[in-house]
Amino acid sequence: MINNALSFLNIPQHSLHFMLLVLGLLTVATAIQMILAIKKPNLELQQRVTSWWWIIGLLFLVFSIGTNTTIFFFGFISFLALKEFLSIVQTRQADRNAIFWAYLSIPLQYYWVAIGWYGMFIIFIPVYMFLYLPLRLILKGDTDGFIKSAGTLQWAVMLNVFAVSHIAYLLILPEKNIAAGNIGLVIFLLFMTQFNDVSQYIWGKTLGKHKILPKVSPNKTWEGFVGGLITITLVAGFIAPYLTPLSQIQGFTAGVLISFSGFIGDVVISSVKRDLHIKDCGNLLPGHGGILDRIDSLIYTAPLFFHYIYYLHY
Amino acid sequence: MNRIIKILFVLLIVRPVVLIILGLNIHNRNKLPLNGPAIIAANHNSHLDTMVLFSLYPLLQVHKLRPVAAADYFLSNPLLAWFSIHVIGIIPLSRSGRKKPQVLFAECHKAIDNGDILILFPEGTRGKPEEASTLKKGIFHLVKERPATPIIPLVTHGLGRALPKGEALLVPFNCDIAIGDALVEVESSTELLAELTDSYAKLLNDCLTYNTTDEI
């Protein structure tokens, strides 16, 4: 019955069911937050949950419209993330022109995705933008701080455009799990990455004692890291065959990969914030911070998960 | 009619530009005066300063916002003058003349009496991008006649990167906007400037994009 009622949504069955499960989990989380709020109101937690409703609702909407809309959506996420990154790091007035071109790489990169030109998609930023952006800087003629600007700019497009665009390319791969569709790969990646953040946080809160990287992220502990790793490995193994072409064993490995690399992505962006002496990258998502604070782990998990399944199945 | 043009301008141009192409980190939004009379004393980096402020107000309130702007610049050609007066709703101020304060600020006082929210840039000019210029005393002579009007210090940061003086290319950057506590019934111009300078320094520290644009 649910299938009939929701058949107008353009989402294959397995992915649709999983999205409904996510909405169920979010409802439970909201209920828990409300109960906790009776004892001790926590504005940040409340905002965090509300933002989650917006994020997941928006994803649900975009997924159900179709592939090109979803590609466009991730392109827009790249734009917001790149803008946030370039706004907090140091740039020179002389860099404005090159920065403008860095933004123009977004529509091009996502266009390669949309037409499924893998060869271009995979080298456009690491090769062509890498060679072109310094040229734009040279044309301005200001050599004081040139090295730093060239480095910052290339890193910025790699993190926010190249890495993030791998999520979108998952949609273009040949369909291998018909019941879940390619959107299943995206849902799997997003869910595992974000659920990893949540479980590392919860394990760390309940059992955490031994700090893992005290200088970068004082709240992260070995207990949180390992607890998250085990949780995600198990959950990924059971969900992978349902949403992706991966077997159960391959799913366990995907879980290890996502949990480990998600942690790295998190602490890399934490180091950026530490370096700049700021707590959040922005305040677009109340309770979370900026868009970068939310997709930090995804920046690492997306390309690694992509190449993992690409190697195994495509 | 002007009110409708201004609402459309804010809805169709200002808001999309400010909220999508730019992006705001707003600090202490609750301190923004939604009703006049009030004077917002902002630092000045870019023409976008005013646009950002417009985007923060409900559409039915935008006609209350009156930027006080240099007559020699904004009235310099007929098209810009029409746009500035009828769409933006500026109060032109002569920077060069040696008029008496009562004459010079007559329009400002009229607006305050009308319950408008004045936007004032005490630095007097946009200056170099992201560098504060010294504050001018004009603002004190303006409020001397209307001492009950609250002065709200407001700092924007990052807009000088998005659209600096003399550049036509708008490059997307997130910008900070931080609003301070209202100053009321200030005794002297020195005191007012000291309090404003102090407030600006504090507000600047809230900005996520601060520390990042200073040239080496």
Image (spheres, helix red, strand yellow):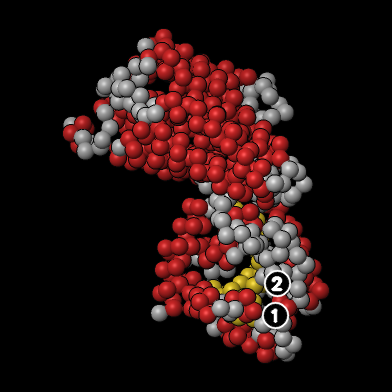
Please report the residue visible at 74 percent of the width from the left and 87 percent of the height from the top.
Answer: B98
Between the residue at mark 2 and the residue at mark 1, the CA separation in whole angstroms equals: 9 Å
Indicate left or right for A92 with A289 as reference: right
Residue A303 at what x, y percent from top left?
49, 25
- The three-letter code of the residue at mark 2 reads Gly
The answer to whether residue B167 of the structure is visible from this angle is: yes
Please report the residue visible at 50 percent of the width from the left and 27 percent of the height from the top.
Answer: A123
Report the residue that reaches farthest toward the right: B190
Indicate left or right for A35 with B31 as reference: left
Asked whether B193 or A226 is in front, the reply is: B193
Image vertical order of residue B196 relative to residue B102, above or below: above
Residue B172 at what x, y percent from top left?
55, 51
Check chain identity for marks 2 and 1: say if they share one.
yes
What's the chain of the residue with tag 1? Answer: B
Name the image quarter holding residue B142. Answer: bottom right
Residue B13 at what x, y percent from top left?
45, 62
Indicate left or right for B136 with A22 as reference: right
Report the residue that reaches farthest toward the top: A249
Q: Which disc number belongs to residue B95? A: 1
Image vertical order of residue B26 relative to residue A254, above or below: below
Q: Are marks 2 and 1 in contact (CB under 8 Å)?
A: yes
- The three-letter code of the residue at mark 1 reads Arg
Residue tagged by mark 2? B124
The answer to which of marks 2 and 1 sits earlier in the sequence is 1
Image vertical order of residue B22 relative to residue B150, above or below: above
| Image quarter (top left, top right, bottom left or bottom right) of the N terminus of chain B | bottom left
For numbered disc 1, what is the local secondary structure?
loop
For numbered disc 2, what is the local secondary structure?
loop
Please report the residue visible at 76 percent of the width from the left and 69 percent of the height from the top.
Answer: B135
What's the chain of the residue with tag 2? Answer: B
Residue B22 at what x, y percent from top left?
53, 53
Q: Which disc number belongs to residue A183? A: none
